[in-house]
Amino acid sequence: MISLAGGSRPGDGYHPQVTTADPLVLARDLSKRFGSFTAVDGISFSVAPGEAFGFLGPNGAGKSSTMRMIGCVSPPTGGELRVLGMDPARDGARIRALLGVVPQQDSLDMELTVRENLILYGRYFDLSYRESRARADELLDFVQLADRAGDEVEPLSGGMKRRLTIARGLVNRPRLLLLDEPTTGLDPQARHLLWDRLYRLKQDGVSLVLTTHYMDEAEQLCDRLVVMDKARIVAEGSPRALIAEHATREVLEVRFAPDARPAEDDPRLAGVAERIEVLPDRTLLYTQDGEAAAVTLHDRGLRPVATLVRRSSLEDVFLRLTGRTLVD
Amino acid sequence: MLASLARLMPGTTGLPGRRGIRLLERNVWVYRRSWIALVTGFFEPLFYLLGMGYGMGALVGEIEGLPYAVFVAPALMATAAMNGALYDSTFNLFYKLRYARTYDAVLATPLGPADVASGEVAWALIRGSLYAVAFVVLMLLLGLALSPLVLLTIPGSLLIGFAAAGVGTAATTWMRRWQDFDLVAVFTLPLFLFSATFFPVTAYPEPIRTIVELTPLYRGIHLLRALSTGQPDPAIVLDVVYLLVLGLVGMSITSRRLGKLLLR
């Protein structure tokens, strides 16, 4: 039995689309339990060749557990999983030989230099020394670390370590690169450099599967993504389709003086937007036309201290689907 | 046991843990730069030999018809083999397992837990063999070897290292804090002092003597002493089997435990 999103939540009625071309990853009703705790609860999805596929979700939604199962370092406890057409339980080593993995924690070898990290990782994949050295130098250029080749790993910045970890994941020329929160904790420059490299990889035909809780990252990188919440998939589609389905075209954000803030059921707000959300600091009006809604508010005698019209983003979809409650 | 190892490495054929050779390479690379740290392991038995063998030996005279230094040297060699392998397989393994997360990265490649176990144990053995060769050279130079059989103490001390590394890695998989390692000394110190290292086992009354004869370091010392003094007796077969089984059981437990710890 395939159990999908819970009945009351948006995204209900979503059915996984399974492409006819051999998928790189195919999961049906995939589950992971640790004792009585369910980390992944019967999820189904597929990743097509050449695709950049994202798992978007708050902390603890089950993204990393799913990634570890795909990476064949965590046996599923239920359902079916095929990676590159093989069964992780039987062909784990063979699958891992063809995957690139960028884990959440860098796990670089601190006892080796930057270049040695890559060369030795290549050896783990049975590359010859000559081949491994050649690839190491090529990849150091690719991630712009050639000038640090002989340095220790420890003093590198977070962004550099991340780039080195990505280079390490590419040393076996994988068909599929798994990235678990690739840019978490990086500064904007480092993030953009990483995105650029990942985009190039994608253009070279490397398929990407990544997890993130950054909406801009998902919008930038993913052709298709699933939103995970509480161990389940609650929505699936392209970033644009998800925004179209779960949000309006525009969002009007208004701020009122504390004593002049209308409540959610204030008659002056009625019918102004398709959906209204009153937050402690601002009020969000989801509408097709933000300017028109702002004019309507003004006509009804509401005088916000600040007004902003913006396009809806994946963030709106995400918060709609997974709620505003803090999870950690 | 090989079958149980094979189960941990799905999709691979051939000898379980054969890819451990790659991890061995890694350790050689790491120590290429810090070879000086390797040399230190040789000094422990050397200092004991000078202090006990010659310092104390001058007071003791002969034991079982042997000059004291001749009696003590193979025991110190066996102890050093045990300590060296234990150090590598406990502290170093714990650091890589819990802090450096070295194996998280390794297991994302075709290598599996059995390869980690075999690679680390093999490294401990290679390191131990360097010390063993150096110590045999020293014994030959000082005239402490009474038989050409002394050359067999090199594989003999590797066997001791294998047993210690097997037990050490297995124990380390249960360790949670650095403080847990204080327990290691609780076992190794009495083994060092009471395994017929400094005085013959005949000094013990029964049943203590039998208990001592059942401990691993005693078997190792018995083996090396029989070889270096050229007095092999049938019991060395027992020594070899005992140490071999201990090492294999330890490795088997280790690869199963590593699988449980790392492949969750």
Image (tube, coloured by chain):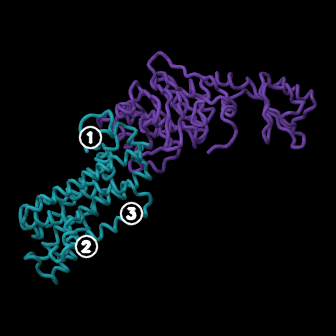
Q: Which residue is mark 3?
A: B181
Q: Amino acid at mark 2?
A: Leu
**Residue drawn where x is 29% and y is 42% of the image:** B4
Measure how far apart labels 1 and 3 are at the Cα level. 31 Å
Taking the image as shown, residue A233 lies to the left or right of residue B226, namely right
Q: Amino acid at mark 3?
A: Phe
Q: Which chain is purple?
A: A
* Disc 3 secondary structure class: helix
Whether the residues at callouts 2 and 1 have beta carbons within 8 Å, the answer is no
The part of the image, by quadrant, that contains residue A286 is top right
Q: Residues within 10 Å of mark 2 (few under 14, many from 20)?
A: few
Measure how far apart labels 2 and 1 are at the Cα level. 38 Å
Label 2 and label 3 in one chain: yes
Mark 3 falls within which chain? Answer: B
Q: Nearer the viewer, mark 2 or mark 1?
A: 1
Q: Nearer the viewer, residue A88 or B108?
A: A88
Choose the circle earlier in sequence order: 2 or 3.
3
Colour for chain B in the figure: cyan
* Disc 1 secondary structure class: helix
Q: Which residue is mark 1?
A: B3
Choose the circle earlier in sequence order: 1 or 3.
1
Q: Which residue is mark 2?
A: B193
Q: Residues within 10 Å of mark 1 (few under 14, many from 20)?
A: few
